Image (cartoon, grey):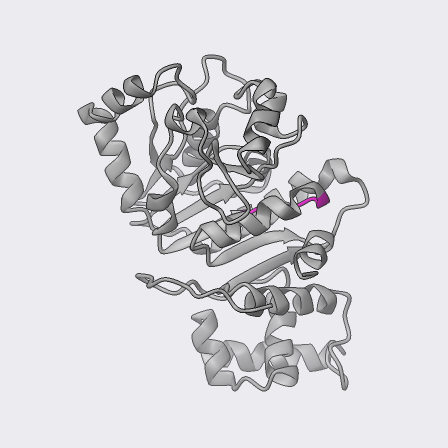
Amino acid sequence: MAAKTKGKRHQKSVLASSDLNVKMAWLYYVEGFTQEEIARRLNISRVKVMRALAQAAADNIVVTTINTPSSEQVILERKLEEGFGLDSAIVVPAPLETDHLEKSIGHAVALYLDAQMKSGMTLAIGGGATMHASLAFMAQRTLENALVIGLVGSLPHSRWVNPSIVATKVAERLGVESYQITAPVVLDDAALRDRLWKQPMLQVVAQCAAEADIAVLTVGDLSPDSTIFRHGIVDPALIEPLKAQGAVANMLCYFVDAEGKLVDHEINDRVMAIDLETVSKVPQLILAAGGENKVEAIRAALKGMDANVLITDAETAKSLLTD
């Protein structure tokens, strides 16, 4: 699989993992990275790397191979990083019950944001079941001069699936303010959408999103069980017409083809969300998704968006690496 060519970024993401100590051991003993190189990629001191490697030996993690169940995940992470040109891949174990997949990936999203989100930073997020699941694991903090930006419009009812509610709750966990797109997710008129984006308040939201430091997107497929259709955000009757136009995935309620490009369907002109091109330019762009039904959708997202971090599960990772 050819590595994806990445566009220019303002900053490179810090290397992450499902098990960072094991990944350090893997990079050092298997791939031959020096301690200085590992420290630089992790943005930590060399002393911390030395201690982690010494502890790995003491704990019998390292013998002549990486001796831990986490090593399989790290192997998958490294293959994803190399195959898709990612700064980091985080692979979590596939849960025994598929109903727990969103919770497993949500847990990894929460851990990643706990480590990466600092005072002075802006976090932009979409909605989705995975982002909602991450809330249960997100540490309560109080950051300074930080913001959370909702990338998708609102729903008229206050269920968990409402993207603006998810953004608000994430902001509450971080102890910061949030900005919302105060308009329905899907409008009935494209001209109305264009007029709304000219409103000063919404232009502020769009500008904040364009200046975000981190963005987290989930990816949906085109099955009736997808969150966007299951909860009536978009009429399920549009599934077949969208497929006829080549759609295989949705991100921020926009529908894209296998190359990650917007399909020629009028609903894309009625979606009230920050455009995908703007989000793709965010310095740290994380895609979080898993499930066999989403493999084609995730591939499309990785092709269409300049993502540098993927959070997924082991079974999905194996399918993504099968070309």
- Residue 294, by quadrant, is top right
Highlighted range, magenta: 288-292
Question: Which percent across, then down, holds residue 182?
Answer: 33, 21
On the image, the x and y values in percent for residue 72 come to 73, 66
Residue under the image location 52 percent in, 68 percent down: 3
Locate the C terminus by quadrant: bottom right
Q: Position of residue 203 (x, y in %)?
A: 22, 31
Point 52% across, 20% down: residue: 233
- Secondary structure of the magenta portion, mostly? loop
Give the residue at x 56% y 18%: 235
Residue lying farthest to the right in this orientation: 96
| Viewport quadrant of the N terminus | bottom right
50 up-or-down from 113: above or below: below
Of residues 307 and 95, the one drawn nearer to the viewer in this rendering? 307
Answer left or right for 315 relative to 259.
right
Q: Taking the image as drawn, is residue 159 in sight?
A: yes
Percent x, y of residue 162:
49, 23
